[in-house]
Image (cartoon, grey):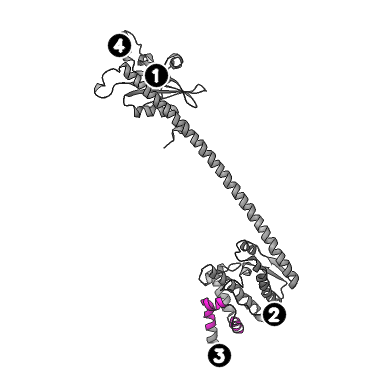
Amino acid sequence: MLLSSNIPPQQLLADFISSAVAQAHHIYCIAQYANNTVLIHTENGEYSNVLPTSLSHFLATSNTGWYAINETPFSKKQHIGQTLLEMELDRDFLLLRNIQAEDCTLFILVQLKPFGIAKDNYLLSAEKKQFERTIRGFIESLLSLRSRDKEILKDIAKSNQMTAVEIADTKTKLSIQSQNYEVAISQFIQLIVNKLQQKYSIEIRISREFVDDLKEYRLPFDQLEPNLERHVQIELNLALAKGESEIVLTPSHLVSFANSSKSVVYANNEGMQLGRHAKTYKLLDRYEAAANIAQEKGLSVIGKNIGNHCSPSVSNASITDALNKHAKKIFELFGKYPDRWNTIRHNFRSVANIIEKETERRRDIA
């Protein structure tokens, strides 16, 4: 349903008078715009006939009052051969002129006749005055309502525009804050990395995924440096064993040693000689870290969830294949380090399966 401010004023008045005044028969609501455009609405809709040639003169010279149809531009018949009384009785069209709307000047020409039992009688002078006051009141109320609706729409549009500007401004500020936070975090972690590089004489690179996860880091930042140092110590042993000269920090290195009941309990790695077990050792660390992350999120310790939390992620099939290939070394490392990899050792069924199979295989050989 359209608001009154979105309905052309000549249509608004003609439709309302037609529906509200039972005595109204024929209605011509004429709108004259500043560019000399003239539009007319009737009780049956838009006036589609050619505009009468005398309409302009009629609107310019006629006064507010009552007219017979023959005295208006909407009849081609001449009003002749009648007495003054007959002429007065035939004047049943009320003309209200020069009604100012916001965008045009309105003229209302409406035929009014008695209604009900006295429908064949003529209107009396007092009745005509009453209709004139009533219809004028309708017009003033409708145009006032239309003006208020228009102001309300303007206020709504202005408010929506201001809200859109505020939302855009807030998004911009949040984006800037996020960028500033990322820069601050990166600078902070780089200071720690620089210290660790100098201390352990190895190059440490920071992955993009590590920075992204660091923005969601919820643990105390005063624990971040010692936590990272322990991860670096582990990675350093693995790197030395494989002859590598750098360490890459990934999201798995944000897993806390101190604050998680599910965190890995690491043994003292100083002087650890991993040898041919180095790759398997790192593989278990990777799966253990991913399993801890999954558990802290309330997820089951299964291949799919572990794979999704590895960086980069891997498929369940890849995890199963890797475990089978490293089965012998996993068995040996589990025996050598009984306090390590507790999460996957006790909760990951795929690991339990290869340990069982390897145990049976060794038993059969013996």
Circle 4: residue type = Glu
Instruction: Answer with mark 4 or mark 1, whichever residue precedes in sequence.
Output: 4
| Location of mark 1 (residue) | 95
> SS at mark 2?
loop
Residue 171: where, in percent of width, then height? 59, 50
Instruction: Answer with mark 3 or mark 1, whichever residue precedes in sequence.
Output: 1
Q: Tell me if residue 11 can be seen.
A: no
Q: Which mark is residue 242?
A: none
Residue 89: where, in percent of width, then height? 31, 14
Instruction: Answer with mark 2 or mark 3, whichever residue precedes in sequence.
Output: 2
Q: Do labels 3 and 1 touch, CB within 8 Å? A: no
Q: Residues within 10 Å of mark 3 (few under 14, many from 20)?
A: few
Q: Which mark is residue 270?
A: 2
Q: Residues within 10 Å of mark 4 (few under 14, many from 20)?
A: few
Residue 10: where, in percent of width, then height? 43, 26
Q: Quadrant of residue 341?
A: bottom right
> Which residue sits furthest bottom?
366
Q: Which mark is residue 86?
A: 4
**Labels 3, 1: front one:** 1
Q: Establish if 187 lies above or below 8.
A: below
In which quadrant will I find the N terminus?
top left
| Location of mark 3 (residue) | 365
Instruction: Answer with mark 1 or mark 2, whichever residue precedes in sequence.
Output: 1
Instruction: Answer with mark 4 or mark 3, whichever residue precedes in sequence.
Output: 4
What is the spatial separation of the Cα atoms under label 2 and label 3, in whole angstroms? 34 Å
> SS at mark 3?
helix
Residue 83: where, in percent of width, then height? 31, 8
> Which region is colored magenta?
328-356
What is the spatial separation of the Cα atoms under label 4 and label 2, in whole angstroms? 124 Å
Q: Nearer the viewer, residue 277 or 126?
A: 126
Q: Residues within 10 Å of mark 1 (few under 14, many from 20)?
A: many
Tell me the residue at 55%/76% (across/down).
344
